[in-house]
Amino acid sequence: MILKPITIVGGGLAGLTLGIALRQRDVPVTLHEAGRYPRHRVCGEFISGHGQQVLRDLGLEKKIYEAGAIEAKTAAFFTTKISGKNFQLPSPALCLSRYHLDHLLAKEFVRLGGELREQSRYQENFTDGIIRATGRRTQAKEDGWRWFGLKVHARNVTLMADLEIHLQPQGYVGLCQLNGGETNICGLFRSRQPVPDLAQTWRDWLQGVPGSELHSRLAKSDFITDTFCSISGLSLSPQLAISHEECSIGDAITMIAPVTGNGMSMAFESAHLATGPMADYSAGKITWQEAWESVTRHCDQHFSRRLRWSARLQKLMFHPGLAGGLIRIGSSCPTLWNRLIAQTR
Ligand SMILES: Cc1cc2nc3c(=O)[nH]c(=O)nc-3n(C[C@H](O)[C@H](O)[C@H](O)COP(=O)(O)OP(=O)(O)OC[C@H]3O[C@@H](n4cnc5c(N)ncnc54)[C@H](O)[C@@H]3O)c2cc1C
């Protein structure tokens, strides 16, 4: 049988995962990626939720551990004044640098016979057989706020929990252990003013307010400056897949609040939800319109609850009084955190 080709635009986690899954079904796939591998990405590098099962089902788990993934089992929240207690995560998360993860998936896609075009920024129309996995849709301002993210790795950081989230006046910073004695330091921030020159000021944003637990954690750390990266123009209001003009997966549908640590999972899961319809389209069993509608419907059904809850959690994190209260209550009742986390999965 002659299979119709699929083109994937965007070689982040969603695009590469879909490419791998389709190649495992012998579908001809071309993937355009604007950048090159390996490269650092702004990400907390904390993989949690059902996406881990997608990686297992694709037979990638062993390779991910071989690339240096380590498990995170505990977490703790902090404000500038309150230190929350450690709590056990409902199930272990995987922590792996995107530098290694994206590269590993790109190599796997090529090994399976996929055609990978690096440094190829796709600018044509999205016609039949072309799926969008281009990551976040940029937006300069949302409700008057400019959102931006920063990431760097560091050595000599001592953590109390495998994942620590530190709430700061203008955002939050996550710290999580990576292999090789490195720690991921990743922050989401917002500003009413134009975003400052981050190449000059990133340390001030990530180190937190003097006197805070975060500041003391990072006082003796050594930043690995060539791992630094930043993004701006983030849009954090949940969107539906059906609202887009192209068949989309991953952040190209919508971003989930980073504090949930679920964006990568959504990228993997949406790729999984797209695999069957794309393979059926390729085999001529359904039209492109039917494939697109199926991906859209399944993604919207699958993600709407967690997007609603994550938007609420995100609002709480930016409300100093309520966030402090939540951290106090969560410290004496860890099941509260796990109930909240379960709603964002
Ligand atoms: C501050 C912050 C912290 C985060 N922390 C976590 C975390 O700890 N855990 C978690 O699970 N998630 C986290 N996330 C979210 C996670 O990073 C994303 O959800 C995930 O990367 C989405 O994958 P994707 O493949 O959809 O998009 P991306 O990984 O962004 O990939 C999109 C790709 O498309 C390419 N591209 C774009 N346009 C074109 C074009 N026209 N032609 C060709 N290529 C193109 C880009 O170069 C890019 O490689 C965080 C996000 C932020 C902002």
Image: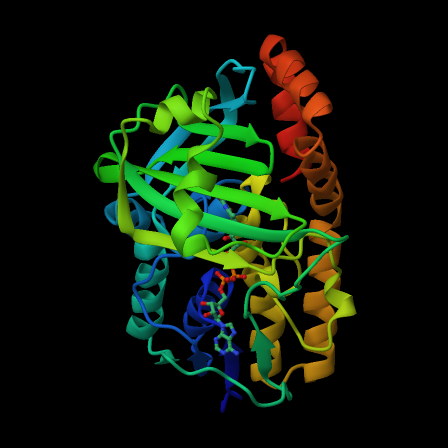
| Relative to 191, residue 30 above or below | below
Which residue is at a point 31% across and 62% down the rendered structure image?
103
Question: Residue 130 lies in what quarter of the image?
Answer: bottom right
Question: Considering depth in this image, is 289 or 12 the residue closer to the camera?
Answer: 12
Which residue is at a point 68% across and 83% down the rendered structure image?
288
Do we see residue 233 in this rendering?
Answer: yes
Residue placed furthest toward the top: 332
Q: In this view, does 343 lie to the left or right of 94?
A: right
Do we see residue 273 in this rendering?
Answer: no
Question: Residue 283 lies in what quarter of the image?
Answer: bottom right
Q: Where is residue 45 in the image (x, y as percent from the top left)?
A: 42, 45
Count of numbered labels shown in the rendering: 0
Question: Considering depth in this image, is 247 or 219 the residue closer to the camera?
Answer: 219
Q: Where is residue 324 in the image (x, y as percent from the top left)?
A: 65, 19
Q: Where is residue 281 in the image (x, y as percent from the top left)?
A: 62, 81
| Relative to 302, residue 158 above or below | above
Question: Residue 309 lies in what quarter of the image?
Answer: top right
Which residue is at a point 68% across and 76% down the rendered structure image?
291
| Relative to 123, residue 242 above or below | above
Q: Where is residue 187 in the image (x, y as percent from the top left)?
A: 49, 42
Color theme of the render:
rainbow
Which residue is at a point 28% across and 72% down the rendered structure image?
111
Q: What is the quadrant of the C terminus in the image? A: top right
